[in-house]
Amino acid sequence: MCTRAVGGLGHYLESEGVPTTQISLVREHTERIRPPRALWVPYDFGRPFGAADDPALQRRVLEAALALLEVEKGPVLEDFPDAGAQNAAHPDGSSEGWACPIPLRSPVTSPDEDSLRRAFLDEFAALRPWYELAVSKRGRTTVGGSGLDLAAAAEFVAAFAGEEIPDNPCPEIPIAFVLRAAVADLKAAYIEAVTAQPGDTVPTHAQLADWFWRETRAAELLFEVKRRAARSQDRALQLVTGVLMIPMARTGG
């Protein structure tokens, strides 16, 4: 449920005498809604409790959110102090102690539709065998929310770098939300692929996010999609690409 809906529900429940608390992923929305109690966390959409497979961190987030119930009256908005995320990178933003073992080419510095699309699809093809290895080793995957085959999801997202909005492969669903789900599938496939690599060093969630948003052509493509979609008349598409597709921490917003 979105921050606005949760905040509104919190006000209603409080009016009935039920104390509430919530976790916020978009601080600006929470500041406007002013829910009774909220904990802002510096994590990506879909991960309000932080990195997967880190129960200690997830417990700290949950305890911090529940601790706000001790405040008798709000509105209260506190920031979750994630020291791990803050210390996972050098001051210049580069990751320490881990590097992607998959060789990726240098970014496309002056992308046009064809060159950026081809560069992304080449990169995706290079990572795909590692993704399939990850699925084989783990017996599971978080990819699949879009309902599209992974290759079809990649082609669909890449097509948004063009001047024209592509055909909707799931016409029963607004194209903006199909795009959001396809992007989520691609990001999950990238992370699962790179963490299937052999080695003793296990990257942190912050390092993986840094790698994806700083070093991959997939991220470069998503920034281009965001720029092009901003000119669209589709308000839902503007919302998805402008707020929900790329973490605000990566856009300077």
Image: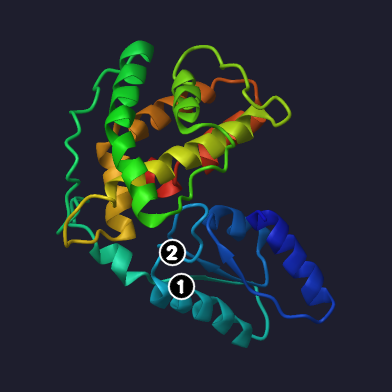
Please state which amino acid type lies under the numbered disc 1.
Answer: Gln
- Distance, label 1 to label 2, CA atoms, is 6 Å
| Residue 253 seen in the current view | no
Q: Is residue 44 above or below residue 250?
A: below
Whole-percent x, y for residue 12 in the image: 81, 68
| In-image side of 120 versus 87 (left or right) | right
Q: Residue at x 60, y 54 (%)?
A: 29
Contact, CB < 8 Å: mark 1 with mark 2? Answer: yes
**Tag 1 secondary structure:** helix
Whole-percent x, y for residue 103 in the image: 16, 36
Q: Which mark is residue 50?
A: 2
Q: Callout 2: few (<14), some (14-19), or many (20+) C-alpha neighbours within 10 Å?
A: many
Q: Which mark is residue 230?
A: none
Q: Is residue 197 above or below residue 215?
A: below
Residue 117's quadrant in the figure? top left
Q: Which residue is mark 1?
A: 58
Task: Give the colour scheme shown.
Answer: rainbow
Please state which amino acid type lies under the numbered disc 2.
Answer: Gly
**Quadrant in which the C terminus appears:** top left
Q: Residue at x 16, y 62 (%)?
A: 200
Residue closer to the observer: 124 or 174: 124
Residue closer to the observer: 248 or 237: 237
Whole-percent x, y for residue 102 in the image: 19, 40
| In-image side of 21 versus 39 (left or right) | right
**Quadrant in which the N terminus appears:** bottom right
Q: Callout 1: few (<14), some (14-19), or many (20+) C-alpha neighbours within 10 Å?
A: some
Q: Is residue 30 above or below residue 240?
A: below
Whole-percent x, y for residue 31 in the image: 59, 59
Sequence-first tag of 1 and 2: 2
Q: Residue at x 49, y 26 (%)?
A: 152
**Tag 2 secondary structure:** loop
